[in-house]
Image (cartoon, helix red, strand yellow):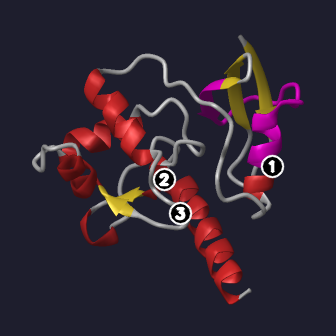
Amino acid sequence: MGMFVVESAIGPLGVSVLGDTVVGVHFGARPGPAGSHPAADQLVAYFAGELTEFTVPVEARGGSEFERAVWAEIAKIPYGEMVTYGSIATALGDPGAARAVGTACNHNPIPVIVPCHRVVGAGGKMVGFGGGLDRKRKLLELEARVALTRSWG
Protein backbone atom coordinates (compact mmCIF):
# COMPACT_ATOMS: atom_id res chain seq x y z
CA MET A 1 0.00 0.00 0.00
CA GLY A 2 1.28 3.46 -0.88
CA MET A 3 0.50 6.86 0.56
CA PHE A 4 1.07 10.37 -0.69
CA VAL A 5 -0.02 13.88 0.16
CA VAL A 6 -2.04 16.28 -2.00
CA GLU A 7 -2.04 19.96 -1.03
CA SER A 8 -5.55 21.39 -1.33
CA ALA A 9 -7.74 24.36 -0.48
CA ILE A 10 -8.88 22.46 2.62
CA GLY A 11 -5.39 21.52 3.79
CA PRO A 12 -3.12 18.58 3.02
CA LEU A 13 -4.90 15.34 2.18
CA GLY A 14 -3.25 12.00 2.79
CA VAL A 15 -4.21 9.55 0.07
CA SER A 16 -3.78 5.80 0.52
CA VAL A 17 -3.67 3.62 -2.57
CA LEU A 18 -3.38 -0.04 -3.32
CA GLY A 19 -2.11 -0.19 -6.88
CA ASP A 20 -4.47 1.95 -8.97
CA THR A 21 -7.23 1.92 -6.32
CA VAL A 22 -7.81 4.62 -3.72
CA VAL A 23 -8.59 3.06 -0.34
CA GLY A 24 -8.41 6.15 1.88
CA VAL A 25 -8.36 9.94 1.99
CA HIS A 26 -7.38 11.58 5.28
CA PHE A 27 -7.76 15.22 6.34
CA GLY A 28 -4.94 17.11 8.01
CA ALA A 29 -2.11 14.96 6.69
CA ARG A 30 1.44 15.85 7.60
CA PRO A 31 3.52 17.11 4.70
CA GLY A 32 4.86 14.16 2.79
CA PRO A 33 5.74 12.93 -0.66
CA ALA A 34 3.56 14.27 -3.46
CA GLY A 35 1.89 11.63 -5.53
CA SER A 36 2.46 10.84 -9.16
CA HIS A 37 -0.78 8.91 -9.31
CA PRO A 38 -4.04 9.49 -11.21
CA ALA A 39 -5.76 10.19 -7.88
CA ALA A 40 -3.31 13.02 -7.14
CA ASP A 41 -3.86 14.50 -10.61
CA GLN A 42 -7.63 14.25 -10.24
CA LEU A 43 -7.68 15.81 -6.75
CA VAL A 44 -5.51 18.72 -7.95
CA ALA A 45 -7.85 19.21 -10.95
CA TYR A 46 -10.92 19.00 -8.67
CA PHE A 47 -9.63 21.75 -6.38
CA ALA A 48 -8.71 23.85 -9.43
CA GLY A 49 -12.35 23.61 -10.56
CA GLU A 50 -11.37 21.64 -13.66
CA LEU A 51 -12.74 18.21 -12.68
CA THR A 52 -16.30 17.44 -11.66
CA GLU A 53 -16.23 13.65 -11.67
CA PHE A 54 -13.56 11.37 -10.26
CA THR A 55 -12.78 8.31 -12.35
CA VAL A 56 -10.11 6.68 -10.19
CA PRO A 57 -11.19 3.32 -8.82
CA VAL A 58 -12.04 3.34 -5.11
CA GLU A 59 -12.52 0.57 -2.61
CA ALA A 60 -13.98 1.30 0.80
CA ARG A 61 -12.40 -1.25 3.09
CA GLY A 62 -14.15 -2.08 6.32
CA GLY A 63 -17.44 -0.64 7.47
CA SER A 64 -20.68 -2.45 8.09
CA GLU A 65 -22.97 -3.59 5.30
CA PHE A 66 -25.18 -0.54 6.02
CA GLU A 67 -22.20 1.86 5.90
CA ARG A 68 -21.01 0.41 2.58
CA ALA A 69 -24.55 0.85 1.20
CA VAL A 70 -24.56 4.49 2.36
CA TRP A 71 -21.16 5.12 0.77
CA ALA A 72 -22.36 3.60 -2.51
CA GLU A 73 -25.41 5.89 -2.42
CA ILE A 74 -23.25 8.95 -1.67
CA ALA A 75 -21.05 8.13 -4.66
CA LYS A 76 -24.10 8.68 -6.93
CA ILE A 77 -24.69 12.31 -5.83
CA PRO A 78 -23.92 14.57 -8.79
CA TYR A 79 -21.32 17.31 -8.57
CA GLY A 80 -22.66 20.57 -7.16
CA GLU A 81 -25.81 18.97 -5.75
CA MET A 82 -26.83 18.18 -2.19
CA VAL A 83 -29.08 15.51 -0.71
CA THR A 84 -30.28 15.06 2.85
CA TYR A 85 -29.41 12.31 5.27
CA GLY A 86 -33.10 11.43 5.27
CA SER A 87 -33.28 11.04 1.50
CA ILE A 88 -30.36 8.60 1.57
CA ALA A 89 -32.06 6.66 4.37
CA THR A 90 -35.25 6.54 2.27
CA ALA A 91 -33.30 5.41 -0.83
CA LEU A 92 -31.91 2.55 1.26
CA GLY A 93 -35.41 1.55 2.36
CA ASP A 94 -35.21 2.81 5.95
CA PRO A 95 -36.66 6.36 6.17
CA GLY A 96 -36.05 6.49 9.93
CA ALA A 97 -32.31 5.91 9.61
CA ALA A 98 -31.17 9.49 8.90
CA ARG A 99 -29.03 9.56 12.05
CA ALA A 100 -27.38 6.25 11.11
CA VAL A 101 -26.70 7.67 7.64
CA GLY A 102 -24.96 10.61 9.33
CA THR A 103 -22.79 8.23 11.33
CA ALA A 104 -21.93 6.29 8.16
CA CYS A 105 -20.99 9.56 6.42
CA ASN A 106 -18.68 10.36 9.33
CA HIS A 107 -16.99 6.96 8.88
CA ASN A 108 -16.52 7.40 5.10
CA PRO A 109 -12.90 6.35 4.49
CA ILE A 110 -12.64 8.16 1.13
CA PRO A 111 -14.02 11.69 1.65
CA VAL A 112 -13.94 14.21 -1.21
CA ILE A 113 -13.78 11.41 -3.84
CA VAL A 114 -16.82 9.70 -2.24
CA PRO A 115 -18.56 13.05 -1.66
CA CYS A 116 -20.07 12.89 1.83
CA HIS A 117 -19.76 16.70 1.92
CA ARG A 118 -22.80 16.75 -0.43
CA VAL A 119 -25.00 15.26 2.30
CA VAL A 120 -26.77 17.86 4.45
CA GLY A 121 -29.41 18.00 7.14
CA ALA A 122 -33.10 18.60 6.55
CA GLY A 123 -33.73 21.94 4.85
CA GLY A 124 -30.12 22.09 3.66
CA LYS A 125 -28.82 22.60 7.20
CA MET A 126 -25.05 22.32 7.49
CA VAL A 127 -24.49 19.53 10.00
CA GLY A 128 -21.71 17.08 10.71
CA PHE A 129 -18.70 16.30 8.60
CA GLY A 130 -15.70 14.20 9.53
CA GLY A 131 -13.40 16.92 8.24
CA GLY A 132 -15.20 19.72 10.09
CA LEU A 133 -17.92 22.09 8.90
CA ASP A 134 -15.43 24.64 7.56
CA ARG A 135 -14.04 22.06 5.11
CA LYS A 136 -17.56 20.95 4.18
CA ARG A 137 -18.59 24.54 3.47
CA LYS A 138 -15.47 25.15 1.33
CA LEU A 139 -16.08 22.02 -0.75
CA LEU A 140 -19.74 22.92 -1.33
CA GLU A 141 -18.82 26.54 -2.21
CA LEU A 142 -16.18 25.34 -4.68
CA GLU A 143 -18.67 23.04 -6.40
CA ALA A 144 -21.44 25.65 -6.46
CA ARG A 145 -19.08 28.24 -7.98
CA VAL A 146 -17.78 25.82 -10.63
CA ALA A 147 -21.29 24.55 -11.47
CA LEU A 148 -22.53 28.13 -11.84
CA THR A 149 -19.59 29.13 -14.05
CA ARG A 150 -20.11 26.08 -16.27
CA SER A 151 -23.86 26.68 -16.61
CA TRP A 152 -23.24 30.25 -17.77
CA GLY A 153 -20.61 28.99 -20.20
Q: CA distance from mark 2 to mark 1?
A: 17 Å
**Residues at marks 1 and 3 touching, judged by CB atoms closer than 8 Å:** no
Find numbered disc 2 in the image and state the secondary structure of the residue it sits on.
helix
Q: Residue at x 75, y 64 (%)?
A: 49
Q: Residue at x 54, y 40 (%)?
A: 111
Q: Mark 1 is on which residue type?
A: Val
Residue receiving disc 1: 44
| Closer mark to the observer between disc 3 and disc 2 | 2
Magenta span includes 38? yes
Q: CA distance from mark 1 to mark 3?
A: 18 Å
Dot 1 alpha-carbon crowd within 10 angstroms: few under 14, some 14 to 19, many 20 or more: some
Dot 3 alpha-carbon crowd within 10 angstroms: few under 14, some 14 to 19, many 20 or more: some
Q: How many labels sit on residues?
A: 3
The foreground one among 75 and 86 is 75
Q: Residue at x 37, y 44 (%)?
A: 73
Magenta span includes 129? no
Report the magenta residues as a range: 22-44
Q: Give coordinates of residue 150: x percent, y percent.
A: 69, 79
Dot 2 alpha-carbon crowd within 10 angstroms: few under 14, some 14 to 19, many 20 or more: many
Q: Residue at x 55, y 64 (%)?
A: 140
Compared across the picture, whether 31 is left or right of 17 comes to right
Q: Extreme bottom residue here?
A: 152
Residue receiving disc 3: 137
Residue 55's quadrant in the figure? top right
Q: In the figure, 135 relative to 69: above or below? A: below
